[in-house]
């Protein structure tokens, strides 16, 4: 990152090194989330022609929507500089983890490669939520650091 190497550029853009580093951390987390989105897509393509039970499809949809909501709230907390929202967001990840465990249990009803693909999907959805939690934690650390200065 050019801006980290050139303090004058950071000053010209009115950015502190702490803010730049925080943006860098969050961008790395988002990149990892993108890797899991790709993993989900690859595994969905492996089960497209499989007749899955409605219940497992619904759980996957609910958990993926929840992971997306957690991500949106974590980013929103950062840009609004809302430490209370960031803390609440961290708590919501437990619900996502429970949903993903339920998907894994349901996946055991299917044959090997199908169960494995469903398991990878659930694992990636869970990881996306946990990465969103990391963004909230990064936000809290950043905001606490601002208060100290």
Image (spheres, grey):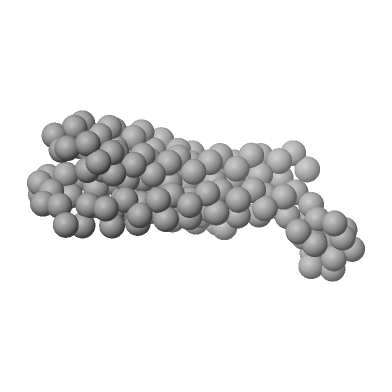
Q: Residue at x 79, y 67 (%)?
A: 13
The quadrant in which residue 89 appears is top left
Residue 74 can be seen in this image: no
**67 or 116, nearer to the observer:** 116
Q: Residue at x 13, y 34 (%)?
A: 109
Q: Residue at x 41, y 35 (%)?
A: 91
Q: Position of residue 98 (x, y in %)?
A: 29, 33
Q: Position of residue 111 (x, y in %)?
A: 17, 37
The quadrant in which residue 114 appears is top left
**44 or 105, nearer to the observer:** 44
Looking at this rendering, what residue extends furthest in the bottom direction? 12
Q: Residue at x 60, y 43 (%)?
A: 138
Number of callouts = 0
- Looking at the image, residue 82 sits to the left or right of residue 40; the answer is right
Residue 112 can be seen in this image: yes
- Looking at the image, residue 67 sits to the left or right of residue 104; the answer is right
């Amino acid at each position: 990152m050019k801006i980290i190497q050139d303090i004058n550029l950071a000053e010209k853009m009115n950015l502190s090194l702490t803010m730049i580093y925080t943006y860098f951390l969050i961008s790395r987390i988002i990149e990892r989330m993108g890797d899991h989105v790709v993993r989900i897509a690859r595994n969905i393509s492996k089960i497209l022609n499989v007749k899955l039970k409605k219940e497992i499809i619904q759980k996957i949809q609910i958990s993926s929507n929840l992971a997306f909501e957690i991500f949106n709230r974590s980013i929103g907390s950062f840009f609004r500089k809302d430490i209370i929202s960031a803390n609440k967001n961290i708590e919501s990840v437990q619900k996502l983890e429970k949903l993903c465990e339920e998907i894994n249990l349901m996946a055991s009803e299917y044959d090997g490669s199908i169960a494995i693909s469903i398991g990878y999907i659930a694992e990636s959805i869970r990881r996306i939520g946990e990465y969103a939690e990391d963004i909230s934690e990064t936000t809290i650390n950043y905001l606490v650091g601002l208060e100290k200065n």
